[in-house]
């Protein structure tokens, strides 16, 4: 079929418009890589794993600084974990393009940051104050920095309304809370942290059982812990005490995943995950299910809801849940009752004289046994067990074989 030139041009234009409407998810590393002035900031987004979390979010603003601004931060000799907190303060959980910055309602706005979302920022220290100043300037400052707006808007780097905005500010915003010493993962005391934030019963049980060591061994490589609240574990304790020693250990390990999952990751991923209790054929897995801001964990026995964040710092995250996770492997299936034998079929009485039955057919040699089903799907003649455990023959070929034997008998 030939197309007229006009039709060909119309189709080509339509394809171009269609492709123009298809865009990939944003990639902060690629955006910043276009400008070498932001190479150090970009490098530390990767080192702290913030780049991954940024790419998984929508409606977000990154306040980047040039290499000079990053050099001032690095001169403080902060640990990589503390630097992550500082940079998290520069990731705003809202969209602010250049135009919106100069049209802020009432001239000032207070916005949450990724630092606040980790749950590690005390009070409101994870919020940033943005104020439209005289002379066309826009100031930025950590809410906990006594109202000081120590950084100003420089320029827009890239905007994809209303998905991601990358803007440059003059310097790193000062925050004593973000710059506070942050212990490395090997220094974390998981059970102590849980005990102080509403999960003492679960934490004490981990210590008493010895399962705590398995959790600690997975900290450096990545760990996510789902910690039942005190009331939830107290309610479950009678059932826990009835488990075997191996069962108790498996149930406790079932509350840990040997992978780091930030809250944005949990909210953007549905599917089955393995746990610290997984061992070969013993699956001990459950399903992460999200619905907007709600994230649930489904084990086929119970569905638990994530109710809070105790810690969310690469490579460890700890979340509170409202129920104890019970794996299906620890629940014995109830035996299926044996069905009662079916009553024997009733034979209808008849006044007619009994019909004489034909004599049983002669035995057929093995060489004449029916063949199996042919590859083309034609009905096969095959042997099947009768109700008494014997074998009966059926099929068209059996009939032909019987007639052949009878005919030979008559001829002889």
Image: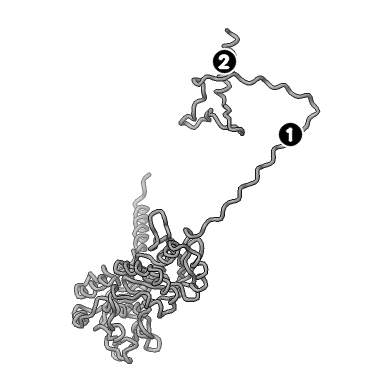
Q: Note whether 125 is above or below 2 in the view shown.
A: below
**Residue at image location 57% in from the left, 7% down from the top:** 412
Is disc 2 placed on a helix, strand or loop? helix
Residue 369 percent across, percent down from the top left: 51, 23
Residue 137 percent across, percent down from the top left: 29, 87
**Residue at image location 42% in from the left, 56% down from the top:** 282
The residue furthest top is: 412
**Structural crowding at the residue carrying mark 1, measured as other residues with C-alpha within 10 Å and reported as few (<14), some (14–19) or many (≥20):** few
Asked which quadrant contains residue 261, the reply is bottom left
**Residue at image location 52% in from the left, 29% down from the top:** 380
Can the viewer see residue 140?
no
Q: Read off the residue under disc 2.
A: 405
Asked which quadrant contains residue 116, the reply is bottom left
**Structural crowding at the residue carrying mark 2, measured as other residues with C-alpha within 10 Å and reported as few (<14), some (14–19) or many (≥20):** some
Q: Read off the residue under disc 1.
A: 347
Residue 326 percent across, percent down from the top left: 48, 64
Q: Note whether 5 is above or below 199 in the view shown.
A: above
Is disc 1 placed on a helix, strand or loop? loop
Is residue 67 rendered to the left or right of residue 261? left
Q: Nearer the viewer, residue 5 or 282?
A: 282
């Amino acid at each position: 079929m030939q197309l007229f030139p006009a039709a060909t041009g119309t189709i080509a234009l339509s394809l171009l418009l269609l492709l123009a409407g298809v865009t990939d998810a944003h990639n902060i590393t690629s955006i910043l890589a276009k400008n070498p002035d932001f190479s150090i900031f970009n490098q530390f987004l990767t080192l702290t794993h913030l780049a991954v979390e940024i790419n998984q979010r929508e409606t977000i603003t990154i306040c980047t600084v040039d290499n000079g601004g990053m050099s001032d931060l690095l001169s403080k000799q902060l640990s990589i974990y503390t630097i992550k907190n500082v940079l998290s303060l520069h990731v705003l959980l809202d969209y602010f393009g250049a135009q919106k910055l100069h049209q802020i309602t009432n001239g000032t706005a207070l916005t949450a940051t990724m630092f606040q979302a980790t749950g590690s920022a005390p009070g409101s220290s994870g919020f940033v104050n943005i104020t439209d100043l005289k002379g066309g300037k826009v100031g930025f400052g950590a809410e906990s920095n006594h109202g000081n707006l120590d950084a100003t808007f420089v320029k827009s780097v890239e905007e994809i309304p209303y998905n991601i905005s990358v803007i440059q500010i003059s310097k790193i915003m000062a925050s004593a809370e973000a710059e506070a010493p942050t212990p490395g993962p090997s220094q974390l005391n998981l059970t102590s942290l849980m005990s102080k934030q509403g999960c003492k019963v679960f934490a004490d049980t981990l210590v008493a059982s010895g399962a705590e060591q398995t959790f600690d061994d997975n900290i450096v490589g990545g760990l996510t812990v789902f910690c039942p609240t005190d009331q939830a574990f107290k309610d479950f304790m009678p059932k826990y005490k009835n488990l075997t020693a191996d069962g108790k250990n498996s149930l406790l390990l079932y509350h840990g995943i040997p992978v780091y999952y930030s809250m944005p990751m949990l909210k953007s991923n549905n599917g089955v995950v393995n746990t610290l209790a997984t061992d070969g054929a013993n699956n001990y897995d459950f399903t992460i299910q999200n619905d907007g801001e709600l994230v649930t964990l489904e084990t086929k026995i119970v569905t638990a809801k994530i109710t809070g964040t105790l810690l969310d710092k690469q490579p460890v995250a700890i979340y509170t849940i409202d129920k104890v996770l019970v794996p299906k492997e620890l629940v014995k299936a109830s035996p299926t009752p044996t069905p009662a034998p079916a009553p024997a079929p009733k034979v209808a009485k008849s006044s007619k004289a009994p019909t004489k039955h034909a004599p049983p057919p002669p035995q057929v040699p093995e060489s004449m046994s029916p063949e199996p089903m042919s590859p083309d799907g034609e009905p096969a003649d095959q042997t099947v067990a009768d109700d008494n455990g014997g074998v009966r023959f059926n099929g068209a070929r059996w009939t032909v074989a019987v007639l052949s034997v009878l005919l030979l008998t008559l001829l002889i």
